[in-house]
Image: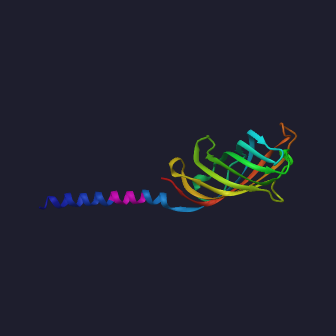
Amino acid sequence: MNKKIPVLIAALVAVIALVGVTGTTSAKGKDRQPIAFDTSLAVVAINGVETNPNSGWTTIDEEILQGLGLINVSAGPAELNGLILTGRQSTKEQFTSEFLPIANVKRGKAKGQFQLSNLAGEVQVNGKYKMKVSSTDACQIYGEGKWKSKAKNSIIDGKGEITVCTNFVVTGEGPLGGFFLTQVSVTGNAALVD
């Protein structure tokens, strides 16, 4: 009988330790916190453009967006610091003119995928977004929508809101004589994935 007591105590301690470790691991993935960052992107490629001159509607199969620097993190896990935002999207927009550099968007929508990568090019976050677009006095293309990122292929699991403001910047270079510059703001809630 006395020999069984230490064995039972050891087994009980092992079970308690296992439950404690399991509880800690799963809790971290459920612990959501506010997230917020902003950055600037350049539209570096536009592929598959179809325009109806009568209606002004333009469909773009793919726009490739490249971050111009590190994201500016104002809330969220420290692991987001030092990352660069890139994206690919498709759009359907009704423009005020056929000549995109001077055109504003009357209405439309965009959807795409985004990634946050470190300076070594390693992807840390994969996500998706959808937006409705129009224009404002300050933005040729203004968009508001939702984003989400799943734990399966990201260091964060979260969702929230995204806003974009895009304007054409004249440089005198390239086929359009400049490029589209997009200011992006992202807010929401996310959990750091184990």
Looking at the image, which is closer to me, 28 or 144? 144
What residue appears at the point 79 percent right and 51 percent down from the top-left corner?
94
Q: Residue 39 in the image: state x and y as whole percent.
A: 71, 52
What residue appears at the point 68 percent right and 55 percent down from the top-left corner?
131
Q: Residue 77 in the image: state x and y as whole percent.
A: 57, 57
Q: Quadrant of residue 21?
A: bottom left
Give the residue at the far left of this rendering: 1
Q: Is residue 171 left or right of residue 20?
A: right
Q: Residue 106 in the image: state x and y as whole percent.
A: 80, 55
Q: Residue 170 in the image: state x and y as whole percent.
A: 86, 45
- Tell me, yes or no, whether the highlighted magenta stretch contains residue 19: yes
Magenta stretch prevailing secondary structure = helix
Looking at the image, which is closer to me, 156 or 150? 150
**Which segment is the magenta one?**
17-24
What residue appears at the point 85 percent right and 38 percent down from the top-left corner?
173
- Tell me, yes or no, whether the highlighted magenta stretch contains residue 118: no
Q: Is residue 27 left or right of residue 132?
A: left
Give the residue at the far top of this rendering: 175
Question: Is residue 122 in view from this perspective?
Answer: yes
Question: Is residue 35 in view from this perspective?
Answer: no
